[in-house]
Amino acid sequence: MNAFVRYVTMGVYKLYYNFHIEGTENIPQDRPLVMASNHRSYADPVILTMPMKLPVTYMAKEELFQKNKLFAWFITMLGAFPVKRGAGDMQVIDDAVDILNSGKHLVIFPEGTRSKDGKVGKGKSGVALIAAKSGADVLPCGIIFEGEKLHFRSKLTLKFGKVIPAEELSVTDTSPKALKAVKTRIMDAIRELVEGPSVNEESIVNEN
């Protein structure tokens, strides 16, 4: 999303929703990141791009680019790129790594589908493989609102957590066990933004 469209869109969202952004101080603006977020609505890619200065892109199914030219133009302006259904998983991973290497942020929704109740799911290991292969840092993101859908003046909060350095996510192999550990690390960070710290984490904080 270019700067002009980003600022206009942010203004519209702040007028239409009770929209707040937290944790912008956690966003490094000098390098591309894997932006890993929970998934609540079709507007999520738009919401996530607003505070970012580097170009942001995300995957979208190829069919969305074939509905009509105006819609295809709009989602392209928002940073979408087409992914063909049935294409090899590794080709998608390689495309994602190429995007990061080109200097753009890459938005990923590890859950793969929208959550209707706001709770964060387990996620899939694709995000772990992209993080491991690209060597990019991961920025956990949380999109929070009550109910299944956004409505006029809904309280909408976008949170950015602390960056997870690539060194913490490096793996010596891409076995399911290794990728699961990386995925779990990322999903736990997203879950903490959306649902708060776990019981064990709260106990540690209280004891200290």
Image (spheres, rainbow, N blue to C red):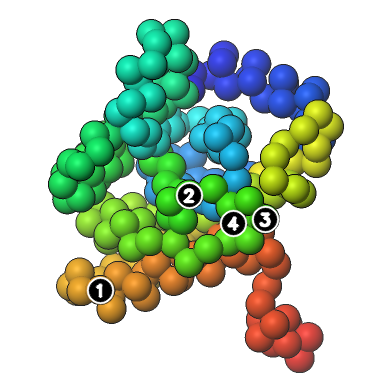
Image vertical order of residue 71 relative to residue 111, above or below: above
Q: Is residue 43 visible?
A: yes
**Element class at badge 2:** loop
In the rendering, at what x and y percent does residue 27 appear? Answer: 54, 46
Residue at 70% in and 40% down = 149
In the rendering, at what x and y percent does residue 119 appear? Answer: 63, 61
Residue at 35% in and 56% down = 127
Label 1 crowd bin: few (<14), some (14–19), many (20+), radius 10 Å: few
Residue at 69% in and 46% down = 148
Give the mark nearest the N terminus, 1 or 4: 4
* Mark 2 to mark 3 CA distance (whole Å): 12 Å
**Which-is-in-front pick, marks 2 and 4?**
2
Disc number placed over residue 80 in the picture, else none = none
Residue 50 found in image quarter: top right
Looking at the image, do the residues carrying marks 2 and 4 touch, with CB atoms under 8 Å apart? no
111 or 93: nearer the viewer? 111
Q: Which residue position holds label 1? A: 176
* Mark 2 to mark 1 CA distance (whole Å): 21 Å
Give the mark nearest the N terminus, 2 or 1: 2
Give the mark nearest the N terminus, 2 or 4: 2
Disc number placed over residue 113 in the picture, else none = 2
Label 3 crowd bin: few (<14), some (14–19), many (20+), radius 10 Å: few
Give the mark nearest the N terminus, 3 or 4: 3
Disc number placed over residue 161 in the picture, else none = 4
**Which-is-in-front pick, marks 1 and 4?**
1
Disc number placed over residue 117 in the picture, else none = 3
Looking at the image, do the residues carrying marks 2 and 1 touch, with CB atoms under 8 Å apart? no
**Element class at badge 4:** loop
- The amino acid sitting under disc 3 is Asp
Image vertical order of residue 118 relative to residue 85, above or below: below
In the rendering, at what x and y percent does residue 193 appear? Answer: 64, 60
